[in-house]
C-alpha cells in the first residue's frame, strides 16, 4: 500500500494534480477539503453558526458523509457542486478550526487510508493525518496567481467574483488556516516543496510522478 500526501494553500493546484496522479497510478484520491466544505454546507443550511463549537458538534454528530471519487454526499444529498459556492469558501476556515470537527474528519480519512493505497490532499495530511506517508508534497504559488486560477474557475461555473476580493479572501483563508491551533497549514519537515506559480498542471503532475517512479525503482 502506498500513501501520498499533497498539502498547500487554496488554489495551489492540489486537487487537480492529485486527481490526475491517482488516475495514472490507479489509486484512490481523497479530497479532504471537500469534507470540511460539506460540514460547512450542512451548518449553513441548518442555519447554525460556523463559529459556535456547540452548533458544530450537533451538525457533525448527525452528519453522514459519503465519499466516492469526485463526489461527496451529506446526509444522502449529493453536495459535490454546492460545496464550491463562494459562500462556503468564505466560511470553511472557521469550521476547520474546530477541534471536534477535525477529529471526526481525520478519523474518517485515516479509516479510508487504512485499507487501500491513497493520494490525499489538504492542509495537514503530511503533518498530521498521514505522518508516515511515503511521499509528501507541498504545493505553493503566489496569492495573485492562485486568485487568478480561482477566478477562471468561478467564471466558468457562472459566478462573477471581483479579482481583488478573491486575493483578499485567499490571503485571509491562508492566515486563518496557518494560525489556527489544531493542525495548522504548515510544511512537513520531509515534504518536497513545489512552487507552481510558473508551472502548468502537467508539469507539476510530471514532477510528482517522476519522483515516485525514481524512489520506487
Ligand atoms: O480548494 P481550496 O484549496 O479552496 O480549499 P479546500 O482544499 O477545498 O479546503 C477548504 C478549507 O478546508 C481550507 O481552507 C481549510 O480551512 C480546510 N481544510 C483543512 O483545514 N484541512 C484539510 N486537510 C483540508 C481542508
Ligand atoms: O486544490 P487547490 O485549491 O490547491 O487547487 P485546485 O482546486 O486544483 O485549483 C487550481 C486551479 O488552477 C485549477 O483550475 C487548475 O487547472 C489551475 N492550475 C493549477 O492547478 N496548477 C497550475 N500549475 C496551473 C493552473
Image: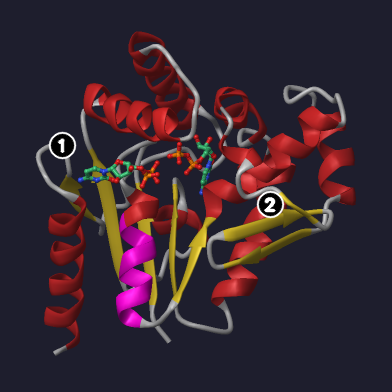
Marks 2, 1: nearer the viewer:
1
The answer to whether residue 17 is above or below residue 206 is above
Q: Position of residue 203 (x, y in %)?
A: 12, 57
Q: Which region shows up in magenta?
A: 17-25
Q: Nearer the viewer, residue 79 or 160?
A: 160
Quarter of the image with the N terminus is bottom left
The residue that appears at 83% across and 51% down in the rendered structure is 63
- Residue 192, quarter of picture: bottom left
Q: Position of residue 48 (x, y in %)?
A: 85, 25
The residue that appears at 34% across and 14% down in the rendered structure is 163
Provide the major secondary structure of the magenta segment.
Answer: helix
Secondary structure beneath label 1: loop
Mark 1 within 8 Å of ligand 2, using the beta carbon: yes
Q: Nearer the viewer, residue 40 or 154?
A: 154
Quarter of the image with the C terminus is bottom left
Say whether residue 145 is left or right of residue 9. left
Secondary structure beneath label 2: helix
Identify the residue under disc 2: 103
The residue that appears at 31% across and 46% down in the rendered structure is 13
Identify the residue under disc 1: 197
Whether 21 is among the magenta residues is: yes
Q: Position of residue 67 (x, y in %)?
A: 65, 64
Amino acid at each position: 500500500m502506498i500513501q501520498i500526501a499533497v498539502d498547500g494553500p487554496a488554489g495551489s493546484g492540489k486537487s487537480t494534480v492529485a486527481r490526475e496522479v491517482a488516475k495514472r497510478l490507479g489509486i484512490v484520491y481523497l479530497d479532504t477539503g471537500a469534507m470540511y466544505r460539506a460540514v460547512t454546507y450542512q451548518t449553513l443550511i441548518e442555519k447554525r453558526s460556523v463559529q459556535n463549537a456547540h452548533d458544530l458538534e450537533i451538525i457533525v454528530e448527525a452528519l453522514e458523509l459519503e465519499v466516492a471519487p469526485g463526489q461527496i454526499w451529506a446526509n444522502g444529498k449529493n453536495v459535490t457542486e454546492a460545496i464550491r459556492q463562494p459562500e462556503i469558501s468564505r466560511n470553511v476556515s472557521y469550521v476547520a478550526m474546530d477541534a471536534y470537527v477535525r477529529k471526526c474528519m481525520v478519523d474518517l480519512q485515516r479509516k479510508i487510508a487504512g485499507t487501500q493505497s491513497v493520494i490525499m490532499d489538504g492542509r495537514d495530511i503530511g503533518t498530521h493525518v498521514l505522518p508516515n506517508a511515503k511521499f509528501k508534497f507541498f504545493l505553493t504559488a503566489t496569492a495573485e496567481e492562485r486568485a487568478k486560477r480561482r477566478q477562471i474557475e468561478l467564471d466558468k461555473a457562472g459566478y462573477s467574483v471581483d479579482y481583488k476580493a478573491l486575493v483578499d479572501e485567499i490571503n485571509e483563508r491562508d492566515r486563518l488556516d496557518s494560525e489556527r491551533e489544531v493542525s495548522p497549514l504548515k510544511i512537513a519537515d520531509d515534504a518536497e516543496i513545489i512552487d507552481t506559480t510558473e508551472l502548468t498542471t502537467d508539469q507539476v503532475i510530471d514532477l510528482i510522478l517522476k519522483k515516485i517512479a525514481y524512489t520506487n525503482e
